[in-house]
Amino acid sequence: MAETDRSSPDADDLAGLLPEHSLLSLEQYLAMQRAIGNETRFRILHFLTETGAHSAKELEQGLDLPSNTLHYHLDALVDVGLVENRKQKTPDSDGLYSYYQAISLGEGILEHGVRELMREEWDLLDAYGK
C-alpha cells in the first residue's frame, strides 16, 4: 500500500491569509479564537455584546459567576484584546469607577464565528425539518 505525502503545512501555506501589513498577527487572531473557545469566556463576551458595558459586580450578578472566576476570565479576554476595562477618573452616580465592554474585534469574532455557525444550524433545521 503506497503512503501519501502528508507533510505538515508550513508558513508558506498560510501566506495570503492576512494583509501584508496586518494590524494583528496570525498568532493574535488564533489567541482570540482560543479565548472564546472557553464556555465561560464565550458567555461573558456574548453578555457584553448583547447588553453593553457593565461593572464587574453587574457581570457577577448577570452571569451568576463568583468574583474570582469572573475576573480570571475577564483578564483573559482583556489580554487577547476582545474586551476592554474602561476606568473613570471619578465615580459615577453608583460610585463605580470601572466598566468592561466588548470591543469591535470581540463583537466581530462572535458575529462572524460561533454565532454564524449557530444561525446556519437553525437555517438548516428550518429548511429540512426538525
Image (tube, rainbow, N blue to C red):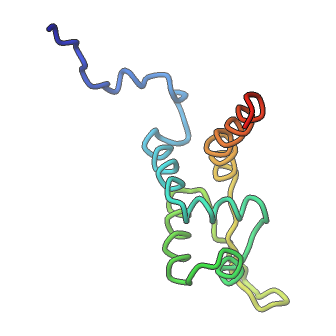
Please name the residue shown 66% across and 43% down the image: 118
Quadrant in which the C terminus appears = top right
The residue lying furthest to the front in this view is 130
Depth check, front residue: 117 or 60: 117
Q: Is residue 44 left or right of residue 28?
A: right
Quadrant in which the N terminus appears = top left
Residue 29, image x and y in percent? 50, 44
Q: Is residue 36 left or right of residue 87?
A: left
The residue lying furthest to the left in this view is 1
Please name the residue shown 47% across and 51% down the image: 34
Residue 82, image x and y in percent? 60, 56
Residue 97, image x and y in percent? 71, 84
The residue lying furthest to the right in this view is 93
- Total marks shown come to 0
Depth check, front residue: 63 or 22: 63
Query: Image quadrant of residue 51?
Result: bottom right
Q: Is residue 94 above or below residue 65?
A: below
Q: Is residue 38 above or below residue 19?
A: below
Query: Image quadrant of residue 14?
Result: top left
Depth check, front residue: 20 or 96: 96
Residue 15, image x and y in percent? 43, 23
Depth check, front residue: 72 or 15: 72
The residue lying furthest to the top in this view is 2
Please name the residue shown 76% across and 87% down the image: 90
Please name the residue shown 81% across and 90% down the image: 94
Q: Is residue 3 above or below residue 94?
A: above
Q: Is residue 81 left or right of residue 34?
A: right
